[in-house]
Image: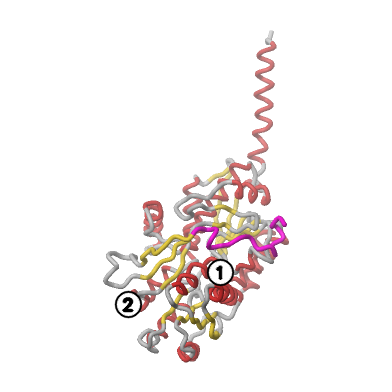
Amino acid sequence: MISATRISMLAAILTAASYAAPAVAQVSDDVVKIGVLTDMNGPASTPTGQGSVTAAQMAVDDFGGKVLGKPVSVIVGDHQIKPDIGAAIARRWYDTEQVDLIVDVPVSAVGLAVQNIANEKKKLFITHSTGAADFHGKFCSPYAIQWVFDTHALAVGTAQEVVKRGGDTWFFITDDYAFGHSLERDASAVIVKNGGKVLGSVRPPFATPDLSSFILQAQASKAKIIGIAAGPPNNTNEIKTAGEFGIFKGGQQMAGLLVLITDIHSLGLPAAQGLLLTTSFYWDMDDKTREWSKRYFAKMNRMPTMWQAGVYSSVMHYLEAVRDSGTDEPLKVAAKMREKPIEDFFSRHGKLREDNLMVHDLVLVQVKSPEESKYPWDYYKILTHISGADAFGPPDPACSLVKK
């Protein structure tokens, strides 16, 4: 005869099992699929591209390759810097390939197009290389997360510091698309707020082969600082062309509002030395950054950009949230991601805010001279750390997710 105590114990075990079983079953289609949507062969492929794919796979491998007992897979798509192609891939992935999360997506126009699809399909999207502040402002979404940077944060870090150092008149060379416009707008506000003046701007199209006329206009402005409100490839070409036209010898300086370590590597220290810039990540900052970056270097034979390091950070945090919430249901996972602080090799004092912007500390750096650099990829002097609150500022009231 079974005792009452044993019956109670069996009932408790069965009850516990009934609660545990659904946790595994909550993974849709019995797999967690992550799509890295990036530029594999074009002008953004070095700072994103295969490096972002590698970073995502490293995170999956380090997590153990499974979550809630189900496999995690990584697939790759090339949007070729075209919003229509990016949107079409995102739609196919969400609709027919059961992708749970899309990551990376360089260039703001493509990022915003993919965000629209994520909203429509009610699936998650984390961008790392889309910097337009509107992404978490007037276009904010419960399904779209911005992880690495925004234009406001880079403007605060670079423009404010340069004005403090006497660079109080500016002329912008701005990429003529959403990201460049946002970068110039946010930097200009910081410059004026700190007592500086913006004398004008020119707007070359993305990936312009000949930037000479734009550099000449910046030179003729007589501004102390020529602000590069651009990403790859225009930013590096502008710095090179400026050197050829004697900008630096004439007493003008350049400040890069978005410059990546791969840009410095391409330029070389003789051309880039002295440049001020703000970054979310530097591989040689401390022991944690060095340990991860050296593992990445072993796979890619170059050091990671802030975007690529951010892909790893976000994928790892996402998988932890799936595990901790017991499901891959998008809004439940996003809510769990907001609960937990983000402290890893990439992020210091990180927190995913209600507007789905990941706020964390940044660093202002100056590019070393060839004489100061002691080993490969030893490119930056860290001038100061900038708190996430100071860099990113408060949530934009235009975001519908922000409590009024």
Horizontal arrangement in the rendering, residue 161 relative to residue 99 (left or right): left
In terms of depth relative to the viewer, which is nearer, 384 or 58?
Answer: 384
Q: Residue at x 62, y 46 (%)?
A: 336
Q: What residue type is labelled 2?
A: Pro
Left or right: 259 in relation to 399: left
Query: In the rendered structure, which amino acid carries the disc numbered 1?
Result: Thr
Query: Looking at the picture, how far across and down is residue 326, in whole percent?
Result: 63, 41
Q: To which residue does mark 2 refer?
A: 270
- Would you place residue 404 above or below residue 43 in this image? above
Residue linked to disc 1? 151
Residue sitting nearer the eye, 220 or 10? 220
In the image, 302 versus 158, the foreground residue is: 158
Residue sitting at x 69%, y 8%: 1
User: Which of 78 and 385 lies nearest the eye of the viewer?
Assistant: 385
User: Which span of residues is magenta-colored?
Assistant: 387-404
Q: Which of marks 2 and 1 is nearer the N terminus?
A: 1
Tell me if residue 81 can be seen.
Answer: no
Task: Provide the major secondary structure of the magenta segment.
Answer: loop
Q: Does the magenta stretch include residue 272?
A: no
Separation of residues labelled 2 and 1 (CA atoms): 27 Å
